[in-house]
Image (spheres, rainbow, N blue to C red):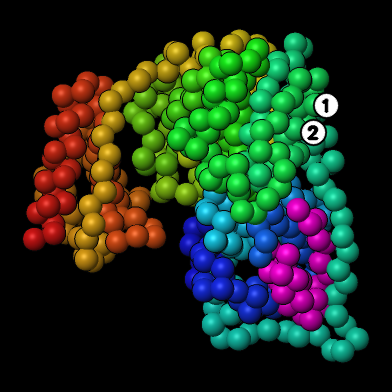
Amino acid sequence: MFGTSGIRGPVGDEVTAALALDVGRALGVDADRVVVGRDPRDSGAALVDALAAGLRESGADVIDLGLAATPTVARSVGWREADAGVSVTASHNPATDNGIKLWQPSGQAYDADLRAEIEERIRESEADLAAWDGFGERESRDATDRHAEALAASVDVDDPPSVVVDLGNGAGGVTVDALGRLGCDVETLNAQPDGSFPGRPSEPTAENCTSLSALVAESDEDLGIAHDGDADRLRAATADGTFVSGDELLAVFGREAAEAGDSVAVPVDTSLAVEDFLAEADVDVTYTPVGDVYVAAAASEDGVAFGGEPSGAWIWPEATLCPDGPLAACRLVELHDERDIAERVAEVPDYPIRRDSVEVQDKGAVMDRVASLVADEFDDVRTLDGVRVDLGDAWFLVRASGTQPLVRITAEARESDRADDAFETAAGLVADARE
């Protein structure tokens, strides 16, 4: 039921009002106050109503933020002294999907143990329903202004740049508000919230953000910023319209956040360029499984100054353990104010990387055989998420897709020929494992 990013799937199939009611009842077993919010998907209002009903009939009070960015919801759990938070969102997934993601008072997403506990309660129909006169209250509140104020207060900008913000028809308007408070000249793109995402697909990839890149390049704007539907992700474009890769942005953010001796949490599919770039400043990397919940858990540890995923999730643990796209926007503006982002990005190495996906009948069995083959042939192996092999001057990762019958292969090296060799090695292991 729960994946690493909560519940997520097609509306009316995997995600229903009945499920939302069950989640509300399960949370209400030991929660007295819960913050809820949603992205602009049409199904979100009904799902929030069902979720709130389950919470209220369990005696829990509901603070309904309405349309709100996911990091606004996550931060509000602590601000409102609540026991939990719920974002009704499918994040960067297509409009046909929706989902439910749960938040702790620290701003960290529910970890595996907490998710399993909620899932067990739902499976066993465990609930603690209140008497007829003990239902919880539901009140509507707006937290966007408080979030924007906190963001603006967290950075120092002397010469505010001009910025294009592509909201992707999502819930990230708090970014526009915060940048305005910093004095930025802000132009918006796809700013009208619309859960059908008519302007572009929700995920802020280079392919989906060509309009943003073109607008920045053809104008006098200094930066381009793009969010997904619930604004927990951020990607960026430089003044000439170049869309910055997720690895480059991770390297830049991590280098600025960490001091010598610190560590930066990154998933196992992160480019070797990030590790090399951080090592120049005597900053280590801590590898995690793929998924912002794992990065957040690592970022909560002592000595970890920052955590990020190349997909666009950025975590500054001193601020919040939730990926906060609007905070990333403000930090990016602050960095650009100090020195052009394009100059910073140009300092990050650019290594050749190879990727492919192989369709398989039983990805679990294939991965078991890959792990066995790798254990026999290689010494430096990580099995945090799939199988990652460090070859010194190259690495490869073989990992099962979380949602499709695919095994994904990634290989990278500092030299092109070596990347090809590493990829062929990994592909050969997968081919042998399929036999």
- Residue type, label 1: Arg
Mark 2 burial class by Cα count in 10 Å: few <14, some 14-19, many 20+:
many
Q: Residue at x 73, y 57 (%)?
A: 37
11 or 311: nearer the viewer: 11
In the displayed structure, 416 sits above or below 111; it is above
Bounds of the magenta segment: 44-67
399 or 121: nearer the viewer: 399
Provide the residue designation for mark 2: 177
- Residue type, label 2: Asp
Residue 10 at x, y percent in the picture: 52, 66
> Looking at the rendered structure, which numbered label has been put on residue 181?
1
Q: Are marks 2 and 1 in contact (CB under 8 Å)?
A: yes
**Per the image, is 56 magenta?**
yes
Q: Residue at x 60, y 42 (%)?
A: 199
Q: Is residue 259 visible?
A: no
Q: Residue at x 58, y 62 (%)?
A: 98
